[in-house]
Image (spheres, rainbow, N blue to C red):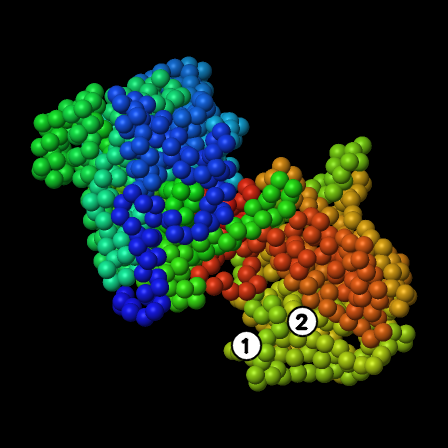
Amino acid sequence: MPSETSPRRAAIAPAVDTLAPAAGHDPLAALTEQTVCRDVLLEKYAKNGETSIDQIRHRVARALAGPEQDPPRWAPVFYKTQSDGFIAGGRINSAAGTDLQATLINCFVQPVGDSVSEVRDGKPGIYVALQQAAETMRRGGGVGYDFSRIRPRGAFVSGTKSEASGPVSYMRVFDQSCNTVESAGARRGAQMGVLRIDHPDIRAFIDAKRDGSLANFNMSVGVTDAFMRALQTGAPWQLVHPSAPGEGFPEAVQRTDGQWVYDTVPATELWAQIMRSTYNHAEPGILFLDRINTDNNLWAIETIESTNPCGEQPLPDYGCCDLGSINLTGFVRAPFSDQAWFDTAAFETTATHAVRMLDNVLDVTVWPLPQQHQEAMDKRRIGLGFTGLGDALLMLGLAYDSPQARDQAGAIARTMRDAAYRASVDLAREKGPFPRFDADQYLGGRSFASRLPEDIKALIREHGIRNSHLLSIAPTGTISLAFADNASNGIEPAFSWWYTRRKREADNSIREYRVEDHAYRLYRALHGPDAALPPYFVTALELSADDHLAMVAAVAPFIDTAISKTVNVPEHYPFADFEQLYLHAWEQGLKGIATYRPNPVTGAVLVADSPATAAPAGSDTDRRLQVNVSMKPVMGSLRWPDRPILEQGAQGWVSEYIEHPTLGSFAVFVSHISDGRVSPFEVWVNGNEQPRALGALAKTLSVDMRSQDRAWLRRKLLSLMKLRGDDYFEMPMPPSGEMRQMPSLVAGFASLLKWRVEQLGAWEDDDQPTPLTDALMFKREPKTGTEGTLSWTVDVRNDATGDDFVLGLKELDMGSTGQGGLLRRPYSMWLAGDYPRVLDGVCKVLSIDMQVVDPAWIGLKLRKLTRFGEPLGDFMAAVPGSDKMRNWPSTVAYVAALILHRYRMLNILDEFGSPLNAMGVMQLAPTTHSESPVLRGKACPECANLTLIRKDGCEYCTACGHIGACG
């Protein structure tokens, strides 16, 4: 980046020195603390009255210095190590030095055998394993399992002379247990489920989450090199198991190695099933088991079959991941300048002391199970990694997707590797090597250790090494937010430069924070709030999938366990290219790959697939309808939610005057545009005696037209054409002027519109997207049973026009909000009393609008109607929710305001009609590149919107900013 000599540059020069000082000074000191960072710190990690990062660091430093011979000497060193950029794993920061009986270890892998309760082949029975997992999660650890030893569905069970139910059935038991057990610190347990590619139940495993179950599992298929070779050659693939099949497999044969062949399928067919599931559901992931085991430093004494829930630690039975990450942004000197450089020496010093700290974690933690303790003491695995890589590269002036960035990342990883291994050798000199250390085995084979620099291998051979494994790059969602000013997560680029975090407070109010990426904040601090971002500022969603994969390939050779990396791909990413990603990952020697693609299946809209039900008979506490819902795909961007300015205008058509015997006369105007296809654009009515409220109906139908959802407009018009009232009349229909009996004025108006739309040919193209129609919660409005349902009602009186009626909103319960309550939504409205019958048409269309799952739509409609005025129709009335009075332009405007008020009461919309939590089902306006885009996903446990995606290995809500489980 060109140097600056301007007064502005001179003014910020001291800030550069402050923001990127020599090691030992907090690199974030010159930036004002982000409120959200402080709140997450206090909520997740502060204990016993702590109010600052420094207090937490001192507590952790004292706790981890405990195993040293001279703790007072090491506590200040460990404090400084944290101040310089080392961030211990979340469990360590949360529990170290407290009286919590919680483990400091993030995750484990635990074995599951092929028995209900007995130990077989060294593996505990299923229900013993279940109990062990429950205890581990209760203490705060996530768990990974390989379920491949469990015999397949239909296998013969000799003890009971019955047939087995298969591993997926038992996974559901583990899933329910995880859902029930709350781990230390109110943290739900995370789980990884693995099944080998040659297990007979692999096809059921791939599709196991389709029904919405196994929500507490990440799932991965354990793929072998033999399968990948079969895939390349198009060979058949055998599904095998040691257990004999039952009567349902008459053609099964036993191989010479003792395995029973249950079925033989084309490798290409099985791979296609995995790819389609991953493309559409974001699961299962892929673990390349042979690569994992070949690269394992302990290849001679253990076999790895699974990973922790995030995938950054392939582990043996009862193995643990003892994690910590170094914030790379703290080692960039003179950031965003021609002189920017990475302070390798300071980084090496921090890595050296971080290894010692993580080694001590193994000696101070609570171990949920004695087997875990023994495994850790035998091998002393730790996992040092880094975070903030994406931001550090930006501070060095490097685009994440550039070859120079990959070279820099590889150099940083190599430096960390060498510093960590040298530090572990020094610890072995002082405290002894790990008990299972054997130099010939450790440095032999084709393992990671065999590829270390020769001088380091010589040191290991001479002195041993304290830790069998040392390196792991984990997701760092909350620790980066709390301790690193929201530096980019782990190995990832920034997902967005800023987003709005919406958090529900104890009083049910919504608090909003602007959450900014650290590098973005720093650049703005140095160059001013309006400075344009350089072209190398590229977010995760702007990168190609190949660029994501290339960064992993650049760093992986220097990491002895694994890297947690989510390759986010756009919704319209071609399936063929998506499939190639996995093949390239295997060809490049990676140990696994996980992707996330927002799509019509991982994203969802609630659609009733079972009848609405009322409360049990005899219950009168709350008789709102309760709707059981399932997932259905939808996503769409609405064109022109507000009326655009058309420089060339729009073409129009006007009807003959419609004469109603009692309600007046009027003409109907319909305009249209043509941009490759004809689209109705707007409708309005004109006439000195036009019926009251008909203009409001035209106004809301105009918005429907501009949505360009043709099925939606058809639904509205057909519904209005059926509306009956006491205002039936005859009207001439074009083009012949034939007189037709209309059941109501509204029905006549809708019939005229339908004719004009059909004449334009606007419904002839059936291939256009239908975002609003797809977003409906139910195909038809649900009906109550004999118990009825509750409604919200309010009186409306307009003395200027003589209107005096009751407005009613029927409501239903749609399931949990994630806050311990039910999400209540209006789904239909009605009027009773004296009012213009045209308002029945307004009620009809707004009721349909209420049934769009994203409340942004009904909010848009109501906001427009609150401004609708009528000649001589304005009146004074109370502001909803207040005792203040104001003038309202019409009865319609007041009704719209009352409905908006009810949505506010239910914490769905704000006073302006905007959702308190953006759902992401549809976009009413484009998102700027700098802001986090709203993407569809699973239901968020905090805001209940269907916007929880997988980002950087962690759950992340693109609507409210909630960060969930990492793993």
Image label count: 2
Could you tell me residue 58's position as x and y percent? 38, 32
Nearest the eye: 90 or 223: 90
Element type where label 1 sits in the image: loop
Kindly report which numbered mark, 1 or 2, lies closer to the viewer in this rendering: 2
Q: Splitting the image into 4 quarters, where does residue 171 fall?
A: top left
Element type where label 2 sits in the image: helix
Disc 2 marks a residue whose amino acid type is: Ser
Nearest the eye: 139 or 817: 139
Decide if residue 136 is on the left or right side of residue 672.
left
Disc 1 marks a residue whose amino acid type is: Arg
Q: Splitting the image into 4 quarters, where does residue 285 fall?
A: top left
**Badge 2 is on which residue?**
702
Q: CA distance from mark 1 to mark 2?
A: 18 Å
Q: Residue at x 9, y 27 (%)?
A: 462
Q: Which mark is residue 830?
A: none
Instruction: Please tell me how crowded label 1 is: few (under 14), some (14-19), or many (20+) other residues with Cα within 10 Å.
Output: few
Could you tell me residue 267's position as x and y percent? 30, 43
Dot placed on the residue nearer the N-terminal end, 1 or 2? 1
Q: Which mark is residue 677?
A: 1
